[in-house]
Amino acid sequence: MNEFELIARFFQRAPRSADVRVGIGDDAAVIAPTPGMEYAVTVDMLVEGRHFAVGADPRRLGHKALAVNLSDLAAMGAMPRYVLLAGALPGADEAWVTAFMGGFDALARQYDVELVGGDTTRGPRNLCITAIGELPAGSALTRAGANPGDRVYVSGSLGDAALALAVAAGKTEVDARSRAALAHRLDAPEPRVALGVALRGIASAAIDVSDGLAGDLGHIVDMSKVGAALSLAAVPCAPSLRAKLAGTHKEREIALQCVLAGGDDYELLFTAPPPLGERIEALALALRLPLTAIGEVTAEPGIVVRDERGDRLAALPHAFDHFR
Amino acid sequence: MNEFELIARFFQRAPRSADVRVGIGDDAAVIAPTPGMEYAVTVDMLVEGRHFAVGADPRRLGHKALAVNLSDLAAMGAMPRYVLLAGALPGADEAWVTAFMGGFDALARQYDVELVGGDTTRGPRNLCITAIGELPAGSALTRAGANPGDRVYVSGSLGDAALALAVAAGKTEVDARSRAALAHRLDAPEPRVALGVALRGIASAAIDVSDGLAGDLGHIVDMSKVGAALSLAAVPCAPSLRAKLAGTHKEREIALQCVLAGGDDYELLFTAPPPLGERIEALALALRLPLTAIGEVTAEPGIVVRDERGDRLAALPHAFDHFR
């Protein structure tokens, strides 16, 4: 199968939305904006051996590669619309591409996201996805709007994906059922698209948790020129992770790392003024997704995390840094 | 230098255009469309050892990586506006990034293109650029509009970059002055942005020559459901290449390969009805860029190339295929 056959077979498709004026198969896609809307645009690059293991399941990878981009759009309050997929592959492996596109397309269909462009080449496996979302003019949720007195919320639970990695690396153990649940969180994160859209006009600032709670909340407080105080006991996490927090010193250290610095959960972390608490509770019910208040925004800069006894944690784990 | 310092130092910058509502440093960029305009979006991935040599000059690479994307936008008739840059690097090499961004930014400034997003990670060197351009609704130049009787035009000259590669590979020789001129064409292609914009309403179909004349004209005739007849003698090429066409059998074979299948020139190939010939001549003068009629669109499918004596070439060289 050559490059053009590969494109024709797996990537070329008739535009579904009338807003796609020119789809895959020309020098560029052409899209028509909806009047009154703005576009959010994000790009993520996933490298084999770094973001995913050699031999990783291609179907799960297709899901995850798109999910991390949709998560970025969700964190802006944008509705995903279009995606471009560039990939380097060691060879034209039909089975691999079929499985990868299976996972990718299934998630794209779920959110009615349309593949409008791409590029394929040979090289060390690398997947680069550009996602474009739409939002009403002026409604973007940025990292810069948090105000002292706002509550800090997080969706779902934190640290699951990091604990799955720690278990896989043999650093700690969990029972078989927890292990499967954690692995699912790592391999098949659900982008919080509906939540992001619903938070327009409610959240004062938002980010998706990809580098870990401490690091990502750090981005919000830096951009908003505020600080935050968190309660560790309030942070939602899986029962297996909660148990480790109450375990031996070594187990607790691993658990703290997962909860505070574990990336890859792709939950939304956001701030909102306390009077909006009821609307957020209603949203949690409607979305069947826990939205938990874990602390508050402070005027003094920096992040303070208080442990189960109310004592301040001496040091916070670092966010993941690709060049460290 | 860690990942965040790298981003802060080389990539983060205040938005210049008021249309950039949120720039680098959030989960996604937010851009406000201009009423009445549509958006062209394209992505290209460049892999070390494939699209550029190990040890390639990073400043030239920064120029070229952006140029190939602007060329795709030009082929749609779009004015480039925004760009996102994702890159995998073997390490946080300040000197390399400084030089790369020097070449990238110089070209971006030339066309007032704004960097609005990106991603950096460690991995085998790979650069993935997404470019977004603007064009009046309905004015996109696609590959699908060529009609029988239209003339086929090409900008600049063809085969220079391919001849530079052939010379570098020791397959053939040219004098030192030609060598420098050819190498410049390979290393620092000029995207035909002004030409692409000017061709709105004139060209019936357009593409940029990245895979070679025969292959890229093949895309136009396939999408337009037409054919084309070209005159080899009319195809504009450098004097050193023209000389090889008139040289030994071996030299002529290399030259034919360069002229008909040499990619990397990033000229525009377009079709237009004969009555617009005068406007195209005027455009060539205004842009100080040769725009040469090299053949015509035919009703019968396929591409016929006639040699200097009017005889039909038996076989056409193939376009470059990354998976062959």
Image (cartoon, coloured by chain):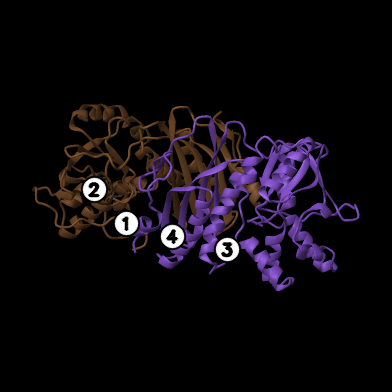
Chain colours: A purple, B brown
Question: At 40% from the left edge and 64% from the top edge, which residue is drawn?
Answer: A92
Q: Chain of mark 1?
A: B
Direction from residue B298 to residue A176 in the image, left or right: right
* Residue B24 visible, this orientation: yes
- The residue identified by callout 1 is B320
- The amino acid marked with disc number 3 is Phe
Q: How many angstroms separate mark 3 from mark 1 (CA)? A: 30 Å
Q: Are marks 4 and 1 on the same chain?
A: yes
- The residue identified by callout 3 is A52
- The amino acid marked with disc number 1 is Phe
Q: How many angstroms separate mark 4 from mark 1 (CA)? A: 16 Å
Q: Nearer the viewer, mark 4 or mark 2?
A: 4
- The residue identified by callout 2 is B240
- The amino acid marked with disc number 2 is Ser
Q: Chain of mark 3?
A: A
Q: Nearer the viewer, mark 4 or mark 1?
A: 1
Give how far across and how far down residue A71 sits, in percent: 60, 49
Q: How many angstroms separate mark 3 from mark 4 (CA)? A: 22 Å
Q: Earlier in the sequence, mark 2 or mark 1?
A: 2
Q: Are marks 2 and 1 on the same chain?
A: yes
Q: How many angstroms separate mark 2 from mark 1 (CA)? A: 23 Å
Q: Earlier in the sequence, mark 4 or mark 1?
A: 4
Above or below, comparing residue A186 to residue B135 in the picture = below
- The residue identified by callout 4 is B49
The label shown at residue A109 is: none
- The amino acid marked with disc number 4 is Gly
Q: Are marks 4 and 1 in contact (CB under 8 Å)?
A: no
Q: Earlier in the sequence, mark 4 or mark 2?
A: 4
Q: How many angstroms separate mark 3 from mark 2 (CA)? A: 48 Å
**Helix, strand or loop status at disc 3:** loop
Q: Nearer the viewer, residue A8 or A282?
A: A282
